[in-house]
Amino acid sequence: MSTKTYTQASPAQQYPEQHAIPRGLGLVTSLGPGLVLAMTFLGTGDLVSSSVSGANYGYALLWTLVLSLIARTFIISAIAKYTLMNRFGDTQILEGFKRIFPWLPGLMAAVVLIAGFVTQAAFLKASAIGLYQLTGGSWGGSWGNFACALIVMALTLFMVTRKKSFAILEYFARFASVAMILAFLYALVRIGHFDLPGFVRGMAFEVPPESMDSAFAPIVIASATIGTIAGNMPNMLYSGFMKDKGWVGPRYRRIQQLDLMAGMAPLLAINLLFWIVASEFSRDNPGFVINTEHDLSQMMSLVVGPAGPILLWLCIFLAAMTSFPPQSRGFAQLAVNGIHLSTRKGKRYLGGKDEHDPLFKKIQIIGFIALPLLASLPAAPNLVALNIVGTSVSTVLSLPFIVIGILVLTGSKKFMADYAVNKWWQSVLLAVLGVIAIVVGFQIAMNIPDMLATAFSGK
């Protein structure tokens, strides 16, 4: 592997001069990778799970949502630090992982190809369902959802094959985040009340009354959530998105940190609004049960009126559509990078533009856009269960390596520029997350046989 070096600053120099932060509208347009990444995390599952938690627990355990997002931001920031401030000019995190575990990029490529396909299939199906419901939800019979999936696929192909495809993804992420925030803010206004003291207690590590006899239950829940999302595979997509933006080298570290925080803020706001609306609604309707997106549609109908279901299905469509197109690009970047790092012929493509790599578009379009369409066929299996299994398997295979690999890379002058090596508290936090990740990964692995049985039983 070549050992490229940056021209901005040598590893022995002081912290390099940073790229100027634009002001006004220029600041908005200069940021983007963080929001694109954050919105890929937001799927139908977030909408349903946050709403179910709000309905079941009120504001208790709300702190787990915030703590999990902080842990994820910390991990992603560490990934970004390596790709900007390493000694070798690596622009993808898998290049760093190869320096520790030469076999890891190949393993990660295989995991991404399989788990990424399952994830994309779930997001395409969710996008199609949202679009189908927005257009009436009563046409085409069993083929209605498939027709909508074809429309979503065509729209995605248009977005990702444009010359400035990443800029299109940025603008779409901005629009979607604002639209979802406004939709649930409107729902909260229509409810007409907000339990501020309860919200504050929920942010202050409140334990649900049902768990008072088991003090460790909330801690277990929080640890599992933090460990899983902190080492989740999509966290690694940020390196490719930064490269798409042109952020290569240590001078972009400050704007990257601002970009990541600016991207995670809307994600937090959206999830908090999901939680708050469901919690406030359940106070007024204690017998109403929320388990699925259809329950949410009914809730929005009761809160907002006839426009409620439209807003809900629009949010579901936007949540899935802000994941499906950008993840097709991010997963393809990750898979191709892992393949090239594992083969001699592929090394010539390292560091170049993705569009110049013939393998990139093939994997993106065929593997992560076209083939997922199979999941929207009327006779397709229970993709929700399969998605859970796919996510679990990818988490078990990648989670410990991601957290431990980042700890090793960012904590050593062997890999990092002198000014970028972790401070002691950063290494301690990464080590704690690494321990949690290993424990959670083991627990998930023990439950995979039961998950597989459930997925293929059709229940």
Image (cartoon, helix red, strand yellow):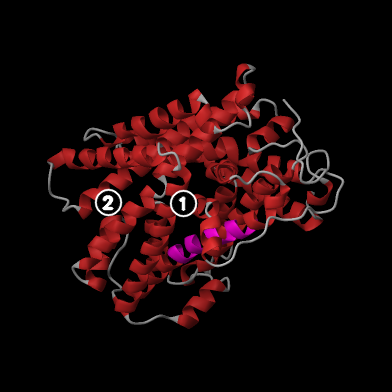
The N terminus sits in image quarter: top right
* Residue holding disc 1: 170
Gap between marks 1 and 2, in whole Å?
21 Å
Indicate the amino acid at tag 2. Answer: Gly
The residue shown at (42%, 71%) is: 58
Left or right side of 102 for 442: left
> Quadrant of the rendered structure where residue 255 is?
bottom right
Residue 459 drawn at (x, y percent): 30, 41
> Quadrant of the rendered structure where residue 158 is?
top left
* Residue holding disc 2: 130
Left or right side of 94 for 309: left
Dot 1 surroundings within 10 Å: few (below 14), some, or many (20 or more)?
Answer: many
Helix, strand or loop at label 2? It is helix
- As drawn, the residue found furthest toward the top would be 345
The residue shown at (39%, 59%) is: 175
Indicate the amino acid at tag 1. Answer: Glu
Does 2 appear in magenta?
A: no
Helix, strand or loop at label 1? It is helix
> Quadrant of the rendered structure where residue 281 is?
bottom left
Q: Which residues are magenta?
A: 257-271
Does the rendering let one see residue 187? yes
Residue 246 drawn at (x, y percent): 60, 44
Q: What secondary structure is the magenta-colored segment mainly?
A: helix
Circles 1 and 2 in contact, beta carbons < 8 Å: no
Return the residue nearer the eye: 276 or 26. Answer: 26
The residue shown at (27%, 37%) is: 376
Q: Which of marks 2 and 1 precedes in the sequence? A: 2
Dot 2 surroundings within 10 Å: few (below 14), some, or many (20 or more)?
Answer: many
Residue 414 drawn at (x, y percent): 82, 38
